[in-house]
Image: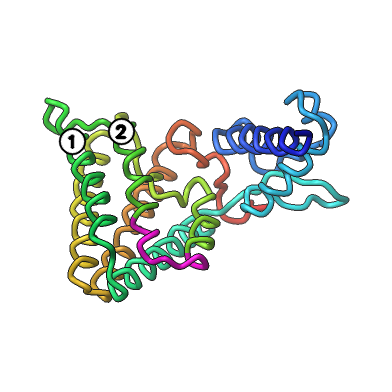
Amino acid sequence: MAESKSVNLTKRATYELRQRIIHGGLPGGTRLYEVALSEDLQISRTPVREAMSRLAEEGLLERAPGGGFQVRSFTLRDVTDAIELRGVLEGTAARLAAEQGAEPRALAEIGAILDRLDACFATGTVGAIDFDGYSELNAQFHTRLAELCQSPVILRELERVKSLPFASPSAFVLGSNENARSYHSLVVAQVQHRAMVQAIERREGARAEAIAREHARIARANLESTFVTDAQTPEAMPGIALIVREGRSG
């Protein structure tokens, strides 16, 4: 029972710290103090210490000079490289799924997610979209599609890179304040979603891989545009507060 409580506290501390980091509450370079965080979160020091170690493994924290941890900063190059790596891993997963052959039931379940994604565009207003619904379903689609490869190694590494907020599959869902740009990119993304599934169904490995890698470029293009035009406000995109101009990364 005590062990289970400790695990739950560690999960809670990890979640709370992650949310503060990606939403700008703890900017890049912030030094984290175990005692202060323990008091702030009202969680004992051991779970807080373990939470910081986990976030360091995810890449959101780094060892600080003299010991302890600090919030990492990233250059735009760091971020685009992370998105590129996700595209490579998702492309490899799609190719393996196509070459091995995917179970019809799994493909049917993914098809149902695609239908629900289509419904996000049917808001009754031309050019409008249910961004929250799309973001959630998009994350489900990418998870289920990757699972088709049945490779624990690829899935583990994919989860690692996706843990960086700006490298997640839904990072490009920019929100209604960028409606025209977002709507166009999501329409293209949905076309690519169906093309990837079709390629896997037809056992076209090279095509599936190429589409998946190109698909990640949407996130890269939108993030670069957001970084330049939106003054790095945390509301513009989760994690953007961690991105600094070249030469200032931690």
Q: Amino acid at mark 1?
A: Ala
Question: Which residue is the extreme one toward the front?
Answer: 1
Asked if the residue under mark 2 is in contact with the one under mark 1, i.e. CB atoms within 8 Å, the reply is yes
Q: Mark 1 highlights which residue?
A: 119
Q: Is residue 168 magenta?
A: no
Q: Compare residues 238 and 245 and report the one nearer the observer.
A: 238
Q: From what the image shows, is residue 76 above or below residue 226?
A: below
Question: Going by the image, does 147 lie left or right of 11?
Answer: left
| Horizontal side, residue 199 vs residue 38: left or right | left
Query: Which residue is pictured at 23% across the width and 41% down the height?
Result: 117
Q: What secondary structure is the magenta-colored segment mainly? A: helix
Locate the N terminus and report the quarter of the image it occupies. top right
The image position of residue 75, as x and y in percent, is: 56, 54
* Mark 1 closeness class: few <14, some 14–19, many ≥20 residues within 10 Å: some
Q: Few, some or many C-alpha atoms within 10 Å of disc 2 (few <14, some 14-19, many ≥20)? A: some
Instruction: Answer with mark 1 or mark 2, whichever residue precedes in sequence.
Output: 1
- Residue visible at 50% across and 45% down? 165
Q: Reply above or below: 174 against 99.
A: above
Q: Is residue 199 left or right of residue 66?
A: left
User: Which label is found at residue 108?
Assistant: none
Above or below, 56 against 205 in this view is above
Q: Position of residue 219 (x, y in %)?
A: 36, 51
Tell me the element at label 2. Answer: helix
**Residue type, mark 2 in image:** Gly
- Determine the image quadrant of residue 220: bottom left
Of 227 and 110, which appears nearest the observer? 110
Which span is picked out in magenta? 145-154
Residue matched to label 2: 133
